[in-house]
């Protein structure tokens, strides 16, 4: 990176106290928080850091409310320190703004940590070329840059984490230098240094082994053995473990007097004797003989030049794998994920970035776990042993013997083992190193949960920005930037799967005449999408087929059938119904598919497909022997949903007989309470709507009328969700789809249910004329078996008439509904009509009749034990009592029903009750309480998207504010209420208009 003019003379230090100098003069870096921000920017090496990342790094969970403002202040101060002569109107050259974040643009030579790593790399290169002296000197120069505790003066979670990493890095380099000094025959020189180091780090077995070897070569065998005894005691006392195999083996070799221990691997360079000595016939000093050295394998596949993204997971895995000499043993990262997610690319990229941490080499094997004949562990070990320099004739035959020899050769060495495409833990177990100086990376489509001590990493698809970056890298950054929106559509159609993104980008790169937008319609057709994801030897479908081919028949059947529902996910119960299995057996199969990375488990008990895997599974189902099994499986799922929804409706509307009229053919869940039932409906809502829509689209003739009736019944059974106010749009869309199918087939029972539900939806949106038409149409379709739904439709028509201020018509309709309910023995229906009719009696000036009707309805609901009905009856009774001046009783009833509606998530009713409470408090002159309840009602109505409720809440809030003397805000609320009523065509608009025109905002 070219140096900026502002950068001249700047130098930064992180390998001790956080410091900076310009031309030798130390700069004042400010407070610890300010130094921490500078530290993060320096360690990011020119890459941008977002404000959110900085706040999390510096303050963690204790960030103050104004952390963003403080951060900007610190950045401004740092800019002033780094570029003191810069005009405020000039853009910074060093600490620049990048999007919403910041980056520190410096050349590499300004930071001690960069110089440290450069020296380590030079040492590694010198060591590979055989120049051990040069390697040692380079490491000493790097270590000289470490002037104390790293990042001293910086605070926060990020600094703590990086401090630990830098300390570990320094120790690792120091241990390598000790190895070099011992190889160069400098054992006497390093004893004192090793004594001090082991005192500071008593549990680092590598340092202890180096001290033992130095003592032994100095002829101090007893001291060497004493070091082992001290180390063993410390490990047992502190960690409860024995010394590792490397230290134990060295101990045995010292005890046996192994002669090879007395010879350094590389002798000091031979110096020619002075000329005078030669003239006198003296012989030159002979160099010590070199001991044979094992080769340094470098078996990794070629680096992935266009590797993109995965920055956070790479950093996490580097931290995991670089942890040496820990009590947890050899660090092992087991990376799993669906085919094409980039497991091998990540592992290879990661391994290449860590070569400096494993200077003794890297071993690689493709275990071919996806093939019919995976690579045998014996074959892999034979290849590893040959790579480590063993002649074929000395390699033992047995798996256990080869594994033991392999671990012995890796003892006291620092090597990385990459095992790619593993089938299972059994294939991997014998291939892992045993020395804590080593590490292993394993990739597999299966989650290797039974691989001892492995850290499981489930690799997900790319983030959208990462996928977009990969697309641009392969297809061309300019083409991607020119059509960024289309490119995002393309990578989204690929499900952000790296293999799919790479394929479509490669196809685009090979066709200069194509545009990015031209790919969008190609990928939009789900039935052809997999065909488009193919280029050369790469194909998403072929990759998926490898994983599918490993499934046992029950797993394969489940994989195919479970892909058929259009819902976003499926529960264990739903899967069990589709597969005709006990839930426990179904869950076992589902979990096995998750372990094989063919399903995802986003939450306990719920399962879903990746979009492309779902397309592959559906295609496989269509081509398979069980192609005819799909429709029956979907019908079983629909029946399961209907059975569950029936149970939910029965609990949510105790006393209602609607649930008894549903065409249920199988059991569903049994719920413990109405709250649990409504919660189930909320969780399953998307899946339920999808099942309804899918059924409506699939039925083609009267032979499938039962399936359509089940879909219509499911809409009816989901009625409690209408009270939540959160699914009105989905209800209308799916009901209209099902209604169209019923009309197409000529299915009157299904049409009746759809029109009733649609009327409920339209009423909730205050589209009263349309709602009335649907309720009347449902009545005209009624037959003998549908009298319950007919009674509900009559009751709904009465409510609509009352809302439209046709109160006498409303009372007549309530009477008809009540008679219908009485004839069929439905007391809950009778009670409902009585409670609702109280409002119309009240508006006709019939106060006594209103109270009597409301109290009678409440009594019936209490008698039949209907909690939901009781709550609604209390609402209507409270409203009537408030209007006749019995305020305390009104508040009591409204408080009782409000608690029920909140607990059962019936937010439409929650809004209504809060509004009524506000009205009662206005009448009582308690304007503060009125304002509070009106604002609660307004908040709920806005959260659920209920404009009529919002207008009512604004009206009562305006009245409460007038009572508090806030006339300006009151008028604003009333004006907004009027505007909403007018937009809805509600009669309340005229009332408010007259009120506003007279200026009587408080009435």
Image (cartoon, rainbow, N blue to C red):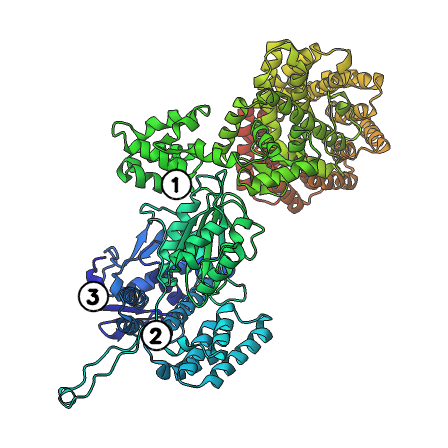
Report, in whole angstroms, how far the alpha carbon at label 1 lies from the one at label 3.
38 Å
| Dot placed on the residue nearer the N-terminal end, 2 or 1 | 2
Q: Is residue 475 visible?
A: yes
Q: Which mark is residue 467?
A: 1
Q: Earlier in the sequence, mark 3 or mark 2?
A: 3
Q: Nearer the viewer, mark 3 or mark 2?
A: 2
- Which circle marks residue 8 in the picture? 3
User: Tags 2 and 1 in contact by the CB under 8 Å rule?
Assistant: no
949 or 69, nearer to the observer: 69
| Disc number for residue 910 | none
Q: How many marks?
A: 3
Horizontal relation, residue 913 to residue 973: left or right: right
> Few, some or many C-alpha atoms within 10 Å of disc 1 (few <14, some 14-19, many ≥20)?
many
User: Where does residue 386 sit, x and y in percent of width and height?
Assistant: 39, 56
Q: Is residue 555 above or below residue 984?
A: below
Mark 1 or mark 3: name the one nearer the start of the chain: 3
Secondary structure, mark 3, is: loop
Q: Determine which quarter of the picture holds residue 530.
A: top left
């Amino acid at each position: 990176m070219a140096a900026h003019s502002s950068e001249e003379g700047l130098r930064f230090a992180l390998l001790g106290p956080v410091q900076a100098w310009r031309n030798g003069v130390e700069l004042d870096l400010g407070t610890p928080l300010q130094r921490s921000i500078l530290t993060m920017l320096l360690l990011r090496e020119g890459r941008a850091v977002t404000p959110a990342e900085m706040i999390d790094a510096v303050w963690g969970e204790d960030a103050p409310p104004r952390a963003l403002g403080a951060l900007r202040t610190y950045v401004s101060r740092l800019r002033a320190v780094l570029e003191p002569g810069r005009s405020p109107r000039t853009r910074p050259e060093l600490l620049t703004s990048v999007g919403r974040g910041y980056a520190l643009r410096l050349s590499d030579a300004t930071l001690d940590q960069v110089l440290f790593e450069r020296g380590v790399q030079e040492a590694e290169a010198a060591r590979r070329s055989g120049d051990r002296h040069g390697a040692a000197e380079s490491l000493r120069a790097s270590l000289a840059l470490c002037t104390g505790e790293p990042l001293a003066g910086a605070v926060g979670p990020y600094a703590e984490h990086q401090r630990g990493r830098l300390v570990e890095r320094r120790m690792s380099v120091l241990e390598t230098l000790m190895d070099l000094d011992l190889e160069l025959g400098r054992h006497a020189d390093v004893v004192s240094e090793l004594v001090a180091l082991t005192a500071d780090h008593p549990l680092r077995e590598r340092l202890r082994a180096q001290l033992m070897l130095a003592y032994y070569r100095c002829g101090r065998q007893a001291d060497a053995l004493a070091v082992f005894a001290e180390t063993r005691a410390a490990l047992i006392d502190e960690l409860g473990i024995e010394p590792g195999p490397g230290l134990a083996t060295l101990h045995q070799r010292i005890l046996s007097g192994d002669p090879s221990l007395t010879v350094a691997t590389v002798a000091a360079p031979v110096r020619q004797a002075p000329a005078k000595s030669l003239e006198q016939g003296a012989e030159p000093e002979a160099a010590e003989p070199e001991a044979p050295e094992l080769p340094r394998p470098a078996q990794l596949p070629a680096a992935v030049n266009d590797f993109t993204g995965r920055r956070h997971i790479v950093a996490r895995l580097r931290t995991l794998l670089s942890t040496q000499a820990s009590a947890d043993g050899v660090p092992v990262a087991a990376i799993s994920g669906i085919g094409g997610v980039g497991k091998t690319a990540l592992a290879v990229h990661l391994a290449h970035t860590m070569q400096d941490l494993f200077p003794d080499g890297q071993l690689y094997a493709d275990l071919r776990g996806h093939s019919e004949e995976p690579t045998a562990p014996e074959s892999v070990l034979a290849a590893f042993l040959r790579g480590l320099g063993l002649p074929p004739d000395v390699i033992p035959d047995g798996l256990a013997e080869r594994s033991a020899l392999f671990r012995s050769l890796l003892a006291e060495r620092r090597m990385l083992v990459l095992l790619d495409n593993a089938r299972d833990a059994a294939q991997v177990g014998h291939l892992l190193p045993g020395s804590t100086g080593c590490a292993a990376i394993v990739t597999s489509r299966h989650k290797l949960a039974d691989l001892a001590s492995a850290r499981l990493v489930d690799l997900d698809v790319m983030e959208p920005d990462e996928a977009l970056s990969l697309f641009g890298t392969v297809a061309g950054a300019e083409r991607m930037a020119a059509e960024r929106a289309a490119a995002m559509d393309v990578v989204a159609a690929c499900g952000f799967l790296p293999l799919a993104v790479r394929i479509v980008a490669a196809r685009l790169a090979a066709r200069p005449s194509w545009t990015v937008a031209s790919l969008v319609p190609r990928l939009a057709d789900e039935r052809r999408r997999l065909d488009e994801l193919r280029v050369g030897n790469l194909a998403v479908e072929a990759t998926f087929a490898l994983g599918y081919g490993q499934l046992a028949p029950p797993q394969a059947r489940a994989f195919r059938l479970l892909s058929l529902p259009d819902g976003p996910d499926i529960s264990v119960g739903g899967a069990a119904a589709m597969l005709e299995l006990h839930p426990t057996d179904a869950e076992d199969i589902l979990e096995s598919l998750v372990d094989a990375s063919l399903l995802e488990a986003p939450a306990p008990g719920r399962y879903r497909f990746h979009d492309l895997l779902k397309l592959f599974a559906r295609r496989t189902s269509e081509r398979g022997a069980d192609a005819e099994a799909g429709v029956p499986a979907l019908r079983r799922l629909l029946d399961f949903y209907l059975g569950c929804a029936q149970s939910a409706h029965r609990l949510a509307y105790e006393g209602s007989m609607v649930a008894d009229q549903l065409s249920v053919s199988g059991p569903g869940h049994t719920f413990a309470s109405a709250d649990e039932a409504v919660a189930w409906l909320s969780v399953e809502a998307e899946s339920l709507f999808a099942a309804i829509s899918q059924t409506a689209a699939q039925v083609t003739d009267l032979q499938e009328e039962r399936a359509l009736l089940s879909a219509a019944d499911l809409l009816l059974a989901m009625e409690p969700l209408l009270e939540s106010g959160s699914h009105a749009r989905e209800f209308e869309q799916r009901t209209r789809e099902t209604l169209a199918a019923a009309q197409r087939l000529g299915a009157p029972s299904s049409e009746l249910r759809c029109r009733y539900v649609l009327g409920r939806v339209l009423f909730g949106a205050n589209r009263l004329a349309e709602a009335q038409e649907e309720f009347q149409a449902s009545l005209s379709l009624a037959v003998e078996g549908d009298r319950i739904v007919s009674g509900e439709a009559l009751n709904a028509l009465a409510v609509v008439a009352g809302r439209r201020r046709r109160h006498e018509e409303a009372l007549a309709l309530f009477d008809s509904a009540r008679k219908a309910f009485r004839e069929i023995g439905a007391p809950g229906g009778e009670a409902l009509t009585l409670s609702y009719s109280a409002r119309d009696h009240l508006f006709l000036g019939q106060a006594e009749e209103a109270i009597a009707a409301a109290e009678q309805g409440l009594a019936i609901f209490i008698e039949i034990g209907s909690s939901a009905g009781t709550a609604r009856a209390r609402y209507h009774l409270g409203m009537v009592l408030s209007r006749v001046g019995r305020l305390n009783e009104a508040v009591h009833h409204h408080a009782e029903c409000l608690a029920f509606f909140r607990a059962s998530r019936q937010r439409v009713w929650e809004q209504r009750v809060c509004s009524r409470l506000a009205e009662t408090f206005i009448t009582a002159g308690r304007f503060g309480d009125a304002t509070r309840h009106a604002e609660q009602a307004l908040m709920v109505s806005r959260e659920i998207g209920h404009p009529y409720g919002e207008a009512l809440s604004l009206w009562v809030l305006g009245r409460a504010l007038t009572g508090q003397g806030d006339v300006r805000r009151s008028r604003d609320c009333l004006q907004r209420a009027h505007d909403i009523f007018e937009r809805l065509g509600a009669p309340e608009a005229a009332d408010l208009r007259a009120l506003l025109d007279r200026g009587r905002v408080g009435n």
